[in-house]
Image (cartoon, coloured by chain):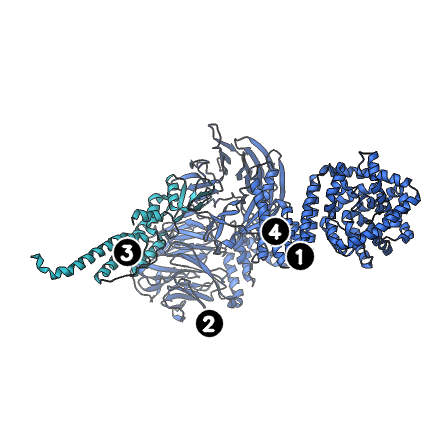
Chain colours: A cyan, B blue
């Protein structure tokens, strides 16, 4: 899967916006949205929120977890534990990236949040690499990783499986190679 | 009472804090590392007054209205208290001062600084300073000997020294503490303290004990210690009576000892275990305020409650001595005198405050006292408190404190001699949806249109207007050079107003952004000495209420319109559409209550006043916090207890509580700040504020939506819930009616949806009552239903085998449809009235007319009568005779009533035709004739209903009272019981009838007597008429039914007696046969009767019924009733 596809999926997540226009309920394939009352918070999918925001038709309200204190806790927890900790949202990275790109003026302490989420992300990716490394080293047949988000799986998933394939090929080739060692010369 | 620890609250930012009470004990004062000194009226005070004294405040002392602070600029400053005006610098150090302290009379201040020095300065004359050198490290704390002879100080060099003030020498030095380099490194700040009054002991917190040193000998007397204390003690404070010592530790323990017994009385642990760095006793002694290094403020109540009693007298006496110094001596004496004199007169006057005042003016012997009270309010506070302190029970004081509006404290109005109801300070005028004026960043208004914010700091004094809907207007930024404090916003204009200053008069400033010309702004100056106190905008107009008790109305373009006077000082105004709502003070409230009145004026085409200054209901001890209109235009308001009330136009403009916002807030100090009310959909828009009454401007608060809930009982049950929903739906759709009445176009679909919803709920409730076997309740619910729902209800009832209920319901349905019809034909009604006027003098058929009048009367009687009718109806079931009675109940009732008094026999005769009853019926010929004519006009079946025309609409009239079939004495009694209730006019018509009848119908008496009063079986005349009807009609084709009868009667009279007799005989014989048949068909017919015969009648009486399109109704009923009885 493509990161763009993952992001696309993340855009289905609901976020709260405060519209500055008035519109009746709109009926879409994915479900009904609205009604939009100026000044009244309403839940819409991220793609619509970003669209409205870009047209300056709404103010975004950061998700509850997008808060310096909570993210610090999450980061610390993530650093403390060896395994993956549950994330506040399955699309935390995508949400953070999109919201901070398009609605940075509506999110207090945006820079700190960006850093914190990146820290958490880095920690998790490091863990992932580490576990992939030990997986390969110990030549395990299977491993179980909980609480990974789609985007994280996506970062290593394709590469890891391909690499394992290659390694498998190499290993299987290694056996006949050993017997025909003399071929080198 | 046991000690109670109030929850801590945020006071300052993290860092060192200090705390004390003011002299009167009415407020808590704290300082913190944010450089602010805050004055808290109580622990729950959400809006403390802040005085900024510097970048950091290390310590402060408070006495005699002087606030001495040690701030980070190395100076010791004076501020006035409570205003916080800087009053100069007392002294300076080369480093910051760590502790400042007053001496007992407040004339001198001691300060210990980080530059190793201790100074004593005269407050009045800062040039008189004494410097004490000797410490080798920063001074931690200082304390004055109450007798002003010594000064104690503790320092980081580990020593505690006692200085002789006069000689400026060190009297004694103890190496008690651990040495350190700086205050921040010190384990303990070692706030030592002298015992008040005599200064017999000096208490020094050393490690985990409090060491007490005796004055003069400087020997350690004893230690106060406790196992509870696990970490070094930081502060020590003596109670004002000198009997108790409180100490706070680094680990958050607070311990109180009784010095005399050295016994530990109280042990309290800080809820989070933070370091206690400030500790202060209330001047009355039962409260201890404390602060920690995290900036939190806490309060202990009822400290040493039990032990205090003995020491009470001791405690208050010296305290009063302290206060004496504050008073002008003369006044003071007067007050003391008063205290003694008053008890004799006060019992008479306690009940009435006014009385008391009168008393004072009349009592010429004490004019000076009165003057003193009025002029010197401060004195009266103090004495009031002293008195309170000597009163053993001070309950309620706390309550008062927290419930008071954020205006002057309660105590300022307290009189020492008066303990009746205390007048509440009037709440100040406010703008709905604004936050307090003194804030530098505040909301001037937040309503359904947008937000107006005001910034008033050093760099900027501006107003920002933002619209929720950017389609209305883009955001605006306005300079606020006039210092506007009030604002309102509508979809066409912004209205701003400022109060007058010394140079400028009060101004109203309007920005009419919706205007199509280029001049969008106008201002109006108020007359001098008139301040604008509240403003509002409506549609096309603006209004302001002023201090001159005037409401001035302007057009939105700036034309002055109406001006009218208010009955009292304004509290708030609000506008919506054409409606102007004014809340004002109707009088003085007592004991925390406000006394408000409300006026609602319509400024539209028909200008009228809807609420005429009615009292505004508020919760106990609350004040108004928001007043305005729902988006749909219904007046609503919110009080400080969080109860939202809305005008119920459907119940004579009463106020109904629709929401209690407190139910939705989690914590006790959380509030909801209302920004709007919407009736469709039902939304209460508010901003939840954590630990505050109003939101800050940053971070931008988010609006939440709360549901409405009427305070109905037992809403946990289905029944209660549905009742609540139903009445809420009714209440919240009142506006539709109001709007349509006032010529606004309104959404028909909303109306029908509302009614649909209500009917659904009614049906549910109906079904619920049905399953609970509550049939009476079902009936009551059915009365609220519409026709359609009612037919459903009938269906439901019959399906669930509740035949009795179904039958009653169908009757009710019939009654309702009749009512509906009556409303639809008001012209007819009038005509009938007109006829009844004529009635008295003339007519062959007076019954018909008078009858209709009786009918209409009876219709008004409605429910009461119908229950009667139902009662009677039961009997009808039994009685075979009863069937045709449905035709004209009221008349029958008349007959019954008039006779009931007469005798049982008479009514007996009604049951069956008795030819031998001649004599008895002749006794009452009038009544007979009435019934005879009734018979004629209301022939049940075969007769083509002569009087149908007039009675058609009422045939299913409410009252279905049969003749009394079984003349039991019980029934007679019952009838007699009902009699008084029938309107007198009814009786009158009866007599009218009587008069008319005796003239008109003498010939019939004979014939009719034979038939008795029985109305159902046909009389001879009727049979004759049937036969000869065609003849009559042939002669006079255009005759109406009544005329036919009249004519018929004339012709019948011409017949010979013999012929008449034969007709009568025939009638009798026929009746015998009929009755048997009827018996079988019995009840169903009685209900269906009319319906069934109506079609044929229709054809027959074509001409007569042409005017009245009744059949539709009848058909409906017929269907209903047919349905109801299908099962049986």
- Camera-nearest residue between B95 and A71: A71
Label 2 marks a residue whose chain is: B
What is the distance, in whole Å, between disc 4 and disc 3 at their CAs? 61 Å
Identified at 61% across, 55% down, the residue is B767
- Marks 4/2: CA distance? 73 Å
Give the x, y percent position of residue B1032: 84, 37
Residue of label 2: B261
- Residue B267: x and y in percent read 44, 67
- Which quarter of the figure is the C terminus of chain B placed in? bottom right
Q: Answer yes or no: are tags 4 and 2 on the same subunit.
A: yes
Q: CA distance from mark 3 to mark 1?
A: 73 Å
Circles 4 and 2, Cβ within 8 Å, touching? The answer is no
Which residue position holds label 4? Answer: B762
Local crowd at mark 1 within 10 Å, few (<14), some, or many (≥20)? some
Mark 1 sits on what residue? B802
- Residue, disc 3: A123
């Amino acid at each position: 899967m493509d990161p763009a596809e993952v992001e696309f999926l993340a855009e289905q997540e609901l976020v709260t916006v405060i519209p500055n226009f008035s519109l009746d309920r709109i009926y879409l394939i994915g479900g009904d949205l609205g009604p939009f009352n100026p000044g009244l918070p309403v839940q819409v999918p991220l793609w619509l929120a970003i669209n409205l925001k870009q047209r300056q038709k709404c103010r975004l309200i950061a998700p509850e977890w997008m808060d310096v204190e909570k993210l610090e806790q999450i980061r610390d927890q993530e650093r403390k534990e060896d395994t993956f900790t549950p994330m506040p949202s399955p699309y935390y990275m995508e949400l953070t990236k999109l919201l901070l790109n398009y609605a940075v003026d509506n999110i207090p302490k945006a820079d700190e949040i960006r850093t914190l989420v990146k820290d958490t992300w880095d920690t998790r990716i490091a863990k992932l690499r580490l576990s992939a490394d030990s997986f390969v080293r110990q030549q395990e047949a299977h491993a179980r990783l909980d609480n990974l988000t789609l985007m994280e799986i996506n970062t290593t998933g394709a590469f890891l499986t391909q690499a394992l394939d290659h390694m498998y090929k190499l290993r299987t080739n290694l056996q006949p190679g050993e017997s025909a060692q003399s071929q080198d010369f | 009472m046991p000690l109670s620890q109030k929850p801590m609250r945020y006071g300052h930012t993290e860092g060192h804090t200090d705390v004390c009470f003011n002299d009167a004990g009415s407020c808590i004062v704290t300082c913190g590392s944010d450089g602010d000194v805050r004055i808290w009226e109580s622990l729950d005070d959400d809006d403390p007054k802040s005085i900024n004294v510097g970048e950091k405040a290390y310590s402060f002392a408070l006495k005699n209205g002087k606030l001495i602070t040690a701030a980070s600029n190395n100076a010791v400053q004076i501020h006035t208290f409570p205003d916080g005006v800087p009053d100069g610098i007392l002294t300076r150090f080369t480093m910051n001062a760590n502790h400042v302290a007053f001496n007992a009379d407040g004339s001198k201040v001691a300060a210990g600084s980080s530059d190793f020095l201790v100074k004593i300065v005269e407050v009045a004359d800062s040039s008189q300073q004494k410097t004490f050198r000797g410490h080798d490290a920063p001074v931690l704390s200082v304390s004055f000997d109450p007798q002003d002879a010594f000064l104690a100080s503790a320092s980081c060099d580990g020593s505690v020294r006692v200085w002789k003030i006069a000689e400026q020498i060190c009297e004694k030095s103890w190496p008690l503490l651990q040495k350190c380099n700086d205050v921040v490194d010190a384990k303990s700040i070692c706030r030592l303290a002298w015992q008040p009054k005599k200064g017999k002991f000096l208490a020094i917190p050393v490690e985990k004990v409090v060491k007490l040193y005796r004055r003069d000998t400087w020997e350690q007397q004893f230690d106060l210690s406790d196992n509870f204390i696990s970490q070094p003690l930081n502060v020590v404070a003596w109670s004002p009576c000198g009997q108790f010592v409180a100490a706070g530790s680094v680990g958050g323990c607070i311990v109180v000892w009784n010095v005399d017994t050295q016994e530990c009385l109280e042990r309290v642990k800080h809820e989070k275990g933070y370091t206690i760095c400030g500790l202060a006793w209330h001047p009355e002694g039962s409260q201890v305020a404390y602060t920690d290094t995290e900036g939190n403020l806490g309060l202990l109540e009822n400290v040493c409650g039990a032990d205090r009693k003995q020491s009470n007298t001791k405690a208050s006496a010296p305290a009063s001595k302290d206060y004496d110094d504050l008073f002008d001596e003369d006044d003071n004496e007067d007050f003391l005198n008063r205290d003694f004199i008053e008890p004799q007169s006060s019992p008479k006057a306690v009940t009435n405050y006014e009385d008391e005042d009168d008393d004072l003016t009349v009592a010429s012997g004490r004019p000076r006292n009165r003057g003193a009270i009025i002029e010197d309010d401060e004195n009266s506070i103090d004495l009031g408190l002293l008195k309170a302190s000597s009163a053993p029970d001070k309950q309620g004081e706390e309550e008062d404190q927290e419930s008071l509006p954020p205006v002057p404290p309660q105590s300022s109005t307290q009189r020492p001699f008066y303990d009746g109801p205390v007048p509440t300070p009037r709440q100040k005028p406010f703008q709905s949806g604004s936050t307090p004026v003194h804030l530098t960043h505040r909301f001037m208004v937040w309503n359904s249109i947008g937000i107006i914010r005001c910034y008033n700091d050093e760099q900027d004094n501006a107003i920002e207007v933002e619209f929720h809907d950017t389609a209305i207007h883009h955001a605006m930024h306005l300079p606020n050079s006039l210092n506007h404090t009030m604002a309102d916003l509508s979809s066409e204009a912004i209205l701003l107003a400022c109060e007058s200053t010394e140079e400028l008069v009060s101004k109203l400033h309007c920005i009419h952004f919706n205007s199509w010309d280029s001049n969008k702004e106008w201002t109006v100056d108020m007359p001098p000495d008139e301040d604008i106190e509240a403003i509002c905008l409506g549609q096309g107009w603006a209004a302001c209420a002023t201090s001159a008790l005037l409401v001035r109305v302007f057009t939105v373009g700036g034309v002055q319109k109406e001006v009218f006077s208010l009955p009292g000082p304004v509290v708030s105004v609000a506008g919506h559409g054409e409606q102007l709502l004014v809340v004002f003070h109707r009088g003085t409230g007592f004991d925390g209550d406000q006394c408000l009145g409300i006026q609602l004026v319509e400024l539209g085409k028909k200008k009228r006043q809807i609420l005429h200054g009615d009292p505004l209901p508020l919760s106990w001890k609350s004040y108004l916090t928001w007043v305005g209109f729902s988006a749909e235009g219904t007046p609503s308001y919110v009080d400080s207890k969080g109860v939202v009330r809305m005008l119920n136009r459907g119940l004579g403009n009463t106020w109904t509580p629709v929401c209690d916002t407190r139910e939705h807030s989690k914590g006790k100090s959380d509030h909801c700040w209302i920004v709007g009310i919407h009736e469709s959909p039902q939304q209460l828009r508010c901003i939840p504020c954590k630990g505050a009454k109003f939101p800050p401007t940053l971070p931008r608060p988010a609006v939440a939506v709360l549901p409405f809930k009427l305070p109905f009982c037992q809403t946990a049950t289905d029944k209660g819930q549905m009742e609540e929903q139903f009445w809420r739906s009714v209440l919240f759709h009142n506006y539709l009616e109001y709007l349509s009445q006032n010529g606004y176009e309104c959404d028909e679909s909303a109306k029908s949806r509302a009614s649909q919803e209500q009917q659904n709920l009614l049906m549910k409730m109906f079904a619920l009552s049905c399953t609970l076997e509550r049939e009476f309740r079902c009936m009551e619910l059915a009365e609220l239903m519409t026709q359609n729902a009612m037919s459903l209800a009938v269906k439901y009832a019959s399906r669930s085998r509740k035949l009795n209920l179904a039958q009653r319901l169908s009757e009710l349905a019939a009654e309702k449809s009749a009512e509906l019809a009556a409303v639809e034909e008001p012209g007819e009604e009038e005509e009938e009235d007109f006829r009844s006027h004529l009635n008295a003098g003339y007519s062959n058929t007076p019954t018909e007319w008078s009858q209709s009048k009786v009918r209409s009367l009876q219709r008004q009687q409605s429910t009461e009568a119908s229950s009667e009718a139902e009662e009677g109806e039961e009997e009808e079931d039994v009685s075979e005779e009863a069937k045709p009675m449905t035709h004209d109940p009221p008349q029958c009732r008349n007959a019954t009533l008039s006779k009931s008094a007469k005798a049982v026999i008479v009514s007996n005769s009604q049951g069956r035709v008795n030819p031998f009853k001649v004599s008895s019926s002749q006794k009452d010929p009038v009544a007979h004739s009435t019934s005879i004519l009734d018979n004629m006009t209301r022939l049940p079946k075969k007769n083509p209903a002569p009087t149908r025309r007039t009675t058609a609409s009422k045939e299913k009239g409410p009252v279905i009272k049969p003749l009394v079939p079984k003349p039991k004495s019980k029934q007679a009694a019952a009838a007699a019981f009902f009699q008084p209730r029938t309107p007198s006019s009814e009786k009158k018509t009866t007599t009218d009838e009587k008069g008319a009848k005796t003239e008109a119908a003498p010939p019939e008496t004979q014939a009719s007597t034979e038939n008795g009063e029985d109305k159902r079986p046909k009389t001879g005349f009727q049979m004759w008429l049937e036969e000869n009807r065609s003849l009559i009609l042939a002669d006079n084709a255009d005759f109406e039914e009544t005329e036919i009868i009249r004519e018929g009667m004339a012709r019948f009279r011409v017949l010979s007696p013999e012929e008449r007799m034969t007709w009568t005989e025939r009638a009798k014989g026929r009746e015998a046969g009929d009755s048997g048949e009827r018996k079988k068909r019995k009840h169903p017919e009685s209900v269906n009767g009319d319906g069934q015969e109506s079609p044929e009648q229709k054809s027959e009486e074509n001409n007569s019924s042409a005017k009245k399109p009744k059949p539709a109704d009848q058909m409906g009923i017929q269907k209903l009733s047919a349905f109801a009885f299908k099962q049986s």
